Amino acid sequence: MKRMLKWGLPLVVLALVVGLSVRGVQQRRAQAALEAAPATAVALEIAPSDQLRVQRLPVQRTVAVSGTVEALHTALVKAKVAGELRALRVREGEPVRAGQVLGELDATEYEARLRQAQQQAAAAHAQLEIAERALQNNRALVEQGFISRNALDTSVSNAAAARANLLAAQAAVDLARKALDDTLLRAPLDGWVSQRFAQPGERLGVDARVLEVVDLRALELRATLAPEEVGQVRVGAQAVLQVDGLAEPVAARVARLNPSVQAGTRAVPVYLALTPRADLRHGLFATGHIEVARETALALPESAIRLDAARPYVLLLQGERVVRRTVTLGPRGTAGGEPVRIVTDGLAEGDVVLAGTVGALPEGVVVRLAARAAGQ
């Protein structure tokens, strides 16, 4: 009995292992058959617009840019002296002219300082007159021998000191008058009020921000480019931008290139001057591309390039079957206003690929045009 148990148990285990292995092989074969069946038996219908024929196109090579639209001329109206904001006469969106009074600070203290400085100047002027009369009298007395030459020298010094005191007092009057004038907040340039940072009644310190004024007659886009891209861009190059909120694209040109790179990112700032338009606003975000060259090359819409694998590929049609074809890509560009990508290897002129609207398809699936299927 012990001998039967010794050999019977391993045989049972071996039989179970063999049975499970056979069952797993059968399940895998069945699954493979199910996966292969749709590709060989069922044809996917596609529209004619889902097919793209590879051809040589006149491509405008571009460099992508994005950034914020900024007014070329902006200014902050700040308090030049400390004081309580008595009045602010403009609000956001209102136009202003250079030199226009936009608001005022409480000038009571500065008016008193001006009067004080004027009185001190008047006193200094009186002292100068006294010193000059004494100098004239002493000169006459010296000639007559009634006083010494030293006394005359003292009178000369007193007159010079009085004259210097008067000049200092007059300078103090000028400073007090300027401080009083600085209580009026004036527009530094023509433009529109974009922000109010303070309200009447607030106590403001020196250099406190009160208003921001922007001039929308000259706008530019500030963007950054990688070092390998900026070498292709030249001042004066044309660009097309799509600004948030605007249906029509905006024309622009490269106005300046920064001579240095940003610390950390090593990106190079580039500035694009925008064609003035009434609907452009300071602070809008924009994306677009700068034209750097023109050439004729094999190109496909960017949407037809698949990037969900280690290397970019396209879905190529060979007869009625889909074949996955790896491609080598060149620079980006536009053709007919549409974004395209130059293909340098992997495709030949006349090849047919599936557009990005088709979505992901397994290799080997059969496709037919919907129009052909309806006619059969």
Image: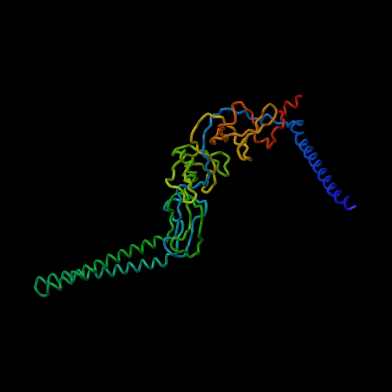
Residue 250 can be seen in this image: no
Residue at the far bottom in the pictured view: 146
In this view, the residue farthest toward the left is 144
| Residue 258 picture location, percent across and down | 44, 45
Residue placed most toward the observer, 306 or 90: 306
Q: Quadrant of residue 302?
A: top right
Q: Is residue 366 left or right of residue 110?
A: right
Q: Residue at x 9, y 70 (%)?
A: 143
- Residue 223 position, x and y percent, is 50, 45
Outermost residue, top side: 376
Q: Which is more toward the observer, 37 or 60?
A: 37
Is residue 209 shown above or below 161? above
Which of 292 and 183 lies nearest the eye of the viewer? 292
Q: How many marks?
A: 0
Q: Quadrant of the C terminus?
A: top right
In the image, taking residue 337 as reference, residue 140 lies left or right, namely left
Location of residue 121 in the rendering, given as x and y in whole percent from the top left corner: 30, 67
What residue is rendered at 38% in x and 68% in y?
A: 112
Q: Quadrant of residue 367?
A: top right
In the current view of this chain or complex, which residue is farthest to the right? Answer: 1
304 or 202: which is nearer to us? 304
Q: Quadrant of residue 80?
A: bottom left
Vertical order, 366 against 68 (above or below)? above
Q: Position of residue 322 (x, y in %)?
A: 68, 31
Task: Tell whether 9 sits left or right of 178.
Answer: right
Residue drawn at point x = 67 percent, y = 28 percent: 318
Task: Mark yes or no: residue 179 visible.
Answer: yes
> Which color scheme does this rendered protein use?
rainbow
